[in-house]
Image (cartoon, helix red, strand yellow):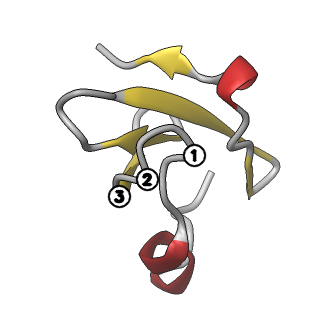
Amino acid sequence: MSELPAELLDILVCPVCHGPLAWDYESSELICVSVNCSLAYPVRQGIPVLLVDEARKAK
């Protein structure tokens, strides 16, 4: 899958801690870069799924 547009990444935040999200190329996920959170959110068919129930703890 291709990268998400930079404009979208600029406005998306983690729904738990409101920290910034970064695109993970290998897993096609958005990763919260906050040290205390580090949740990974799936991106399905180019649409970020920012639901806490869908998130997993990033490595």
Vertical comparison of 3 with 31: above or below: below
Describe residue 43's horizontal placement relative to residue 44 as left or right: left
* Residue under the image location 40 percent in, 34 percent down: 26
Residue 41 at what x, y percent from top left? 58, 34
For mark 3, what is the residue? 20
Question: Which residue type does callout 1 highlight?
Answer: Pro
Q: Which residue is mark 2?
A: 18
Determine the residue positioned at 73% across, 19% down: 53
Q: Are marks 1 and 2 in contact (CB under 8 Å)?
A: yes
Secondary structure under badge 3? loop
Say which mark, if any, is on residue 34.
Answer: none
In front: 14, or 45? 14
Q: Residues within 10 Å of mark 2 (few under 14, many from 20)?
A: few
Give above or below for 49 relative to 7: above
Question: Label 2 amino acid?
Answer: His
| Disc 1 element | loop
SS of the residue under disc 2: loop
Q: Quadrant of the image for the C terminus? A: top left
In-image side of 42 versus 26 (left or right): right
Distance Cα–Cα, label 3 vs label 2? 7 Å
Eyeballing the image, is 3 above or below 59? below
Specify the farthest residue to the right. 45
The nearer-to-camera label among 3 and 2 is 2
Report the amino acid beneath label 3.
Pro
47 lies above or below 57:
below
Q: CA distance from mark 1 to mark 2?
A: 6 Å
Q: Looking at the image, is mark 3 or mark 1 earlier in the sequence?
A: 1
The single residue placed furthest to the bottom in the displayed view is: 7
Residue at image mark 1: 15
Instruction: Residue 37 in the image: state x and y as whole percent.
Output: 33, 28
Please tell me how crowded label 1 is: few (under 14), some (14-19), or many (20+) other residues with Cα within 10 Å: few
